[in-house]
Image: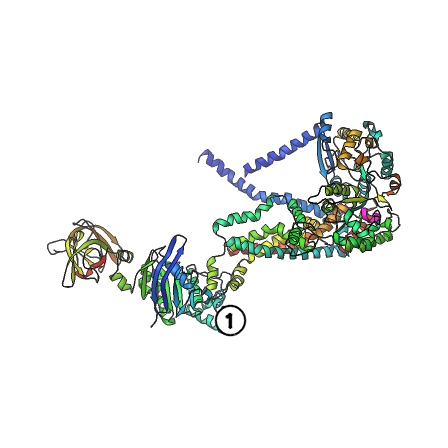
């Protein structure tokens, strides 16, 4: 028995040692979305600065949220979505202020995006925008043509008008499993304020979703890209990035290519911005600033946008991108479309609870 | 007495104490302590602007909501129902497998059991994703069905409750097969000959002898599948439809979507209470099985 | 009267092994028939062929005039008592016994009456509610018996029925079984490796060796007139020698046998007129006397060893011819004053008809 204790004790000892060494050296612990950076960026940063990057990834805001709220996450840079997650986390005091003096590339940021972000982070004190996009309609081009002819696809009617959605039921409809993304769009469809916190308004929005629910195969946040690209579904309400990735994958699909496209609803689209922030309990604050500043380098930002196909929060990077990214109106929409972007505020706990509850009831048909 | 012998003699009681202590220490560290923490959180208040977002108060507000809102009871009942059906499906698939393996030539049993366990050397998540690929609209199953010309429009299994049953049956099959195999394998083959000799046709012999004697295995296997299936989250989320209300998903929503730790903890505590009955049943069955040996 | 059981040219192979290598046998109704042999002789396989657990590769089995080929165990008019008893562990004694009757879909009341009757017969009426694991070995054996006879089969098959019992219980149960068999009038076919058991119980015995039946007969016949060396050696003790037939006179064969001191006489056996033969003399058929002036004749030798068994003793005698023989003597007196002991010079004699002549 005593012998069995020894390896256990030494393992624990080693872990403790490793932990202390980890916090002393020149390292930065980055927690980012999956597939959200040019692949060689961490290595290039390490070569340029001598700071080792521990790069780990997540794929839902909720996982990041839970880790931050538990405290002592061990991360130095995280990338939550502006609203509601970043806003709520900031309110809970989870982040430390950005020292802009340490960011020599700060001036490269897009003022328009900074302004949108300032609604939740006045003075942009806690967050630095990384990439942004819209929420809209992904569709299978062939299926849409067959069902709608040449009628326009860039309308919320496509996903909220029961008769229209029903036409797509046979080929598959999916919707984001996210009340904070779907309910504001439903409010907008009704001509109401998408950021309304009124209970009545929320109930009305919920009814809109309830009416189309029979045509929806699944509410999900994770399966849309593959489902669209494989032709398993023909209509989806989701983030721009998902659909644009599905568009690329579908074009390469075997044996026959699947043509997928994206439409930004003309009624307006919820703007999402993913924000780099430094947790309050971060240990490597200086290194965190170096990392953020490195990503603000226009060349680095442009390479990342080229790789993942999202619009960058870095204005100076745009001219350096491939033209099929910077010139794509679905990635960088023209001014009239941008004018109708909206964002929503986090809401208080009672509102959150009500929203989640409404959503559960919608999904389970209660 | 030699020096070595003396050391051994002195060391032995200490060693024995440690041996007894280790499982208790393990339980304390990895069951009792986390359980106490979750219990304490479940009684606290949800305070979104603190880290962590809970204040320990013993108010028990979460439990009031748990009882007051019909959603939770509905979620528990639905979880129990789905877990029960999935368990029956697993039993119907697992019993013939365990039976065949137990009756196979001795040299074959090891490899066959291995074959049952082998898929579990790959990641659970990857295997469930593979099922998504098989069951989806243009997935393997439908391609085969269409290709065979048997069915033109087979429909989609993915997203239905049957996909959940299938997923659970697949994922938990070894937990069903192994206890069943254990109880079937130790059964004396002469008992079936005796039954036949006394006039029982094969099916009657199975019903009156094999089945009752494998009852401990059936109870054990069913509970080993049922208990985790009630709280299963990944399989219903990935294979099931949106409309499937299960307690695992409710818990996920409480914790991740709402960030309401006390409520999530209360849901978890209530799940434990719901499962106490089957767990006690399982322990009884095991004790009886051991005593009968 | 036609035989109740008729086994015709039955062969059963397991892969390369021939377990039953061509058996022809008739068993009459009312017999207590024993299949006797060492392990691997095919006796259990033959019993299982009768029960229907095995099917013959060649030949056929007819029971009560019905060809059993293709008839499954559950449809045969036989019941078996298993060596391991094979009692259903999850059923009470009464349920075990009732099992076979329930399969016949008899009325509840009749089942209960017959179960009670047969449990009384085996003196287990008081234990009807117990589970098998709550019973002693002897009680379990009687449950197994009750379960097998309650269906009133035409034939009861018994596979080493007493092997699991200790010696005292076994000897008592042997007689109880015989008594029971007479009362019920059921034909018993019993497999055993124990020659004493076979001799004590059976009306007829079939001695088996390597898948074949070597000799069939009543116990005394098999003991006194074994057909070959194997049987003589397998059943009881025997002194066995080689010899040559040299002539015939007065219905006796003249046989030259060096170990027995030259030429001896033995009763004639049909079919044996000359050539090399084996001779067997049972130890109790040899007489032992002290070698002194009063006793001449027979063969001289000395006692090498004495095995004392209580009721009798076995003397190992080294003859002057070079052979060693075993001689048994009853210990009729408690303290024989003139007891023969180790090292004593003795003379061994026998009657002519004590010698059994067998083909080599």
Quadrant containing the N terminus of chain B is top left
The image quarter containing residue C215 is bottom left
> As drawn, is C191 to the left or to the right of B91?
left
Which residue corresponds to mark 1?
Answer: C105
Q: Where is residue A345? Give x, y as percent.
A: 85, 43
Q: Main secondary structure of the magenta part?
A: helix
Q: Position of residue A19 (x, y in %)?
A: 67, 32
Q: Is residue B4 above or below residue C166?
A: above
Tag 1, which chain? C
Between residue B89 and residue C11, name the one nearer to us: C11
A168 sits left or right of C323 in the view: right
Write down the region rendered in magenta.
Answer: A180-185
In the displayed structure image, the side of residue B175 where residue C1 appears, left or right = left
Looking at the image, is A22 positioned above or below residue C226? above
Between A281 and B174, the residue placed more toward the observer is: B174
B19 w.r.t. C352: above or below: above
Taking the magenta stretch, the answer to whether it contains residue A260 is no
C151, A96: nearer the viewer: C151
Numbered marks: total: 1
The image shows residue C53, relative to residue B256, as above or below, that is: below
Q: Viewed as shown, does residue A357 lie left or right of C168?
A: right
Residue A181 belongs to the span the image colors magenta: yes
Identity of the residue furthest to the left in this view = C293
x, y percent for residue C205: 32, 63
């Amino acid at each position: 028995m005593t012998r069995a204790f020894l390896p256990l004790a030494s393992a624990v000892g080693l872990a403790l040692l490793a932990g202390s060494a980890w916090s002393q050296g020149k390292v930065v612990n980055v927690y980012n979305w999956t597939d959200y950076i040019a692949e060689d960026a961490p290595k290039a940063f390490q070569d340029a600065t001598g700071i080792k990057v521990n790069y780990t990834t997540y794929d839902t805001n909720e996982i990041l949220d839970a880790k931050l709220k538990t405290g002592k996450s061990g991360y130095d840079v995280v990338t939550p979505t502006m609203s509601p997650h970043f806003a709520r986390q900031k309110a809970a005091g989870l982040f430390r202020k950005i020292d802009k003096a340490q960011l020599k590339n700060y001036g490269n940021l897009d003022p328009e995006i900074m302004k949108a972000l300032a609604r939740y982070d006045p003075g942009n004190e806690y967050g630095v925008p990384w990439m942004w996009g819209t929420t809209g309609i992904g569709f299978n081009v062939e299926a849409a043509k067959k069902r709608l002819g040449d009628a326009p696809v860039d309308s919320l009617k496509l996903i909220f008008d029961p008769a229209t959605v029903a036409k797509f039921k046979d080929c598959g409809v999916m919707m984001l499993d996210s009340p904070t993304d779907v309910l504001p769009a439903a409010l907008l469809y009704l001509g109401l304020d998408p950021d309304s916190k009124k209970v009545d308004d929320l109930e009305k929005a919920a009814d809109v979703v309830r009416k189309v629910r029979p045509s929806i195969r699944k509410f999900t946040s994770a399966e849309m890209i593959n489902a669209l690209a494989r032709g398993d579904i023909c209509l989806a309400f989701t983030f721009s990035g998902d659909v644009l990735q599905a568009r690329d994958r579908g074009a390469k699909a075997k044996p026959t290519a699947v043509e997928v496209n994206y439409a930004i609803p003309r009624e307006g689209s919820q703007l999402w911005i993913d924000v780099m922030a430094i947790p309050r309990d971060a240990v490597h604050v200086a290194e965190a600033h170096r990392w953020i500043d490195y990503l603000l380098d226009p060349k680095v930002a442009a390479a990342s946008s080229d790789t993942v196909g999202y619009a960058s929060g870095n204005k100076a990077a745009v001219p350096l991108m491939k033209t099929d990214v910077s010139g794509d109106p679905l990635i960088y929409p023209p001014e009239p479309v941008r004018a109708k972007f909206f964002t929503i505020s986090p809401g208080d706990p009672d509102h959150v609870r009500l929203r989640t509850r409404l959503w559960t009831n919608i999904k389970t048909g209660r | 007495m030699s020096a070595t012998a003396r050391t051994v003699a002195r060391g032995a009681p200490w060693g024995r104490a440690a041996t007894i202590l280790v499982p208790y220490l393990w339980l304390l560290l990895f069951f009792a302590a986390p359980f106490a923490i979750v219990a304490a959180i479940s009684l606290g208040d949800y305070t979104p602007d603190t880290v962590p977002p809970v204040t320990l108060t013993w108010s028990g507000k979460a439990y009031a909501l748990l009882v007051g809102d019909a959603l939770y009871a509905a979620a528990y009942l639905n979880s129990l129902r789905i877990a029960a059906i999935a368990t029956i499906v697993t039993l119907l698939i697992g019993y013939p497998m365990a039976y065949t393996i137990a009756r196979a030539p001795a040299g074959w049993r090891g490899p066959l059991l291995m074959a049952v366990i082998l898929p579990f050397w790959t990641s659970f998540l990857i295997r469930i994703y593979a099922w998504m690929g098989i069951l989806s609209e243009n997935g393997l199953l439908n391609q085969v069905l269409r290709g065979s010309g048997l069915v033109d429009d087979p429909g989609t299994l993915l997203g239905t409750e049957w996909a959940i049953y299938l997923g659970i049956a697949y994922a938990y099959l070894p937990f069903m097969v192994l206890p069943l195999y254990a109880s079937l394998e130790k059964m004396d083959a002469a008992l079936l000959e005796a039954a036949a000799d006394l006039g029982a046709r094969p099916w009657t012999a199975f019903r009156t002898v094999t089945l009752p004697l494998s009852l401990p295995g059936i109870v054990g296997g069913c509970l080993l599948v049922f208990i985790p299936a009630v709280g299963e989250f990944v399989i219903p989320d990935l294979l099931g439809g949106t409309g499937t209300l299960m307690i695992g998903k409710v818990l996920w929503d409480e914790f991740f979507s709402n960030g309401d730790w006390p409520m999530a903890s209360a849901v978890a505590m209530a799940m434990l209470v719901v499962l106490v009955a089957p767990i006690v049943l399982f322990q009884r069955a095991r004790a009886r099985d051991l005593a009968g040996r | 009267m036609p035989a109740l059981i008729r086994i015709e040219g039955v062969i059963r192979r397991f892969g390369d092994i021939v377990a039953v290598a061509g058996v022809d046998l008739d068993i009459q109704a009312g017999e207590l028939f024993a299949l006797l042999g060492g392990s691997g002789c095919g006796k259990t396989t033959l019993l299982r062929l009768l029960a229907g657990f095995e099917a013959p590769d060649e030949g056929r089995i007819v029971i009560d005039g019905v060809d059993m080929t293709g008839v499954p165990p559950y449809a045969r008019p036989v019941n078996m008592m298993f060596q391991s008893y094979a009692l259903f562990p999850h059923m009470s004694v009464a349920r075990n016994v009732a099992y076979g009757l329930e399969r016949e879909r008899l009325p509840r009341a009749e089942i209960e009456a017959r179960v009670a009757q047969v449990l009384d017969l085996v003196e287990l009426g008081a234990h009807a509610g117990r589970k098998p694991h709550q019973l002693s070995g002897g009680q379990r054996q009687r449950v197994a018996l009750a379960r097998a006879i309650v269906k009133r089969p035409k034939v009861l098959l018994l596979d080493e029925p007493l092997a699991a019992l200790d010696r005292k219980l076994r000897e008592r149960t042997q007689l109880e079984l015989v008594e029971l068999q007479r009362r019920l009038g059921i034909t018993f076919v019993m497999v055993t490796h124990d020659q004493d058991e076979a001799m004590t119980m059976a009306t007829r015995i079939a001695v088996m060796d390597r898948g074949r039946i070597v000799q069939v007969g009543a116990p005394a016949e098999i003991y006194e007139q074994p057909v070959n060396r194997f049987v003589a050696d397998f059943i009881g003790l025997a002194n066995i020698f080689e010899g040559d037939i040299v002539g015939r006179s007065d219905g006796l064969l003249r046989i030259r046998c060096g170990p027995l001191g030259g030429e001896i006489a033995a009763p004639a056996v049909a079919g044996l007129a000359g050539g090399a033969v084996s001779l067997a003399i049972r130890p109790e058929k040899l007489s032992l006397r002290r070698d002194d002036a009063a006793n001449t004749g027979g063969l001289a030798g000395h006692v090498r060893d004495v095995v004392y068994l209580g009721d009798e003793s076995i003397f190992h005698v080294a003859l002057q011819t070079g052979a060693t023989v075993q001689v048994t003597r009853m210990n009729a007196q408690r303290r024989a004053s003139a007891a023969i002991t180790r090292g004593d010079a003795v003379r061994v004699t026998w009657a002519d008809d004590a010698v059994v002549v067998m083909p080599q």
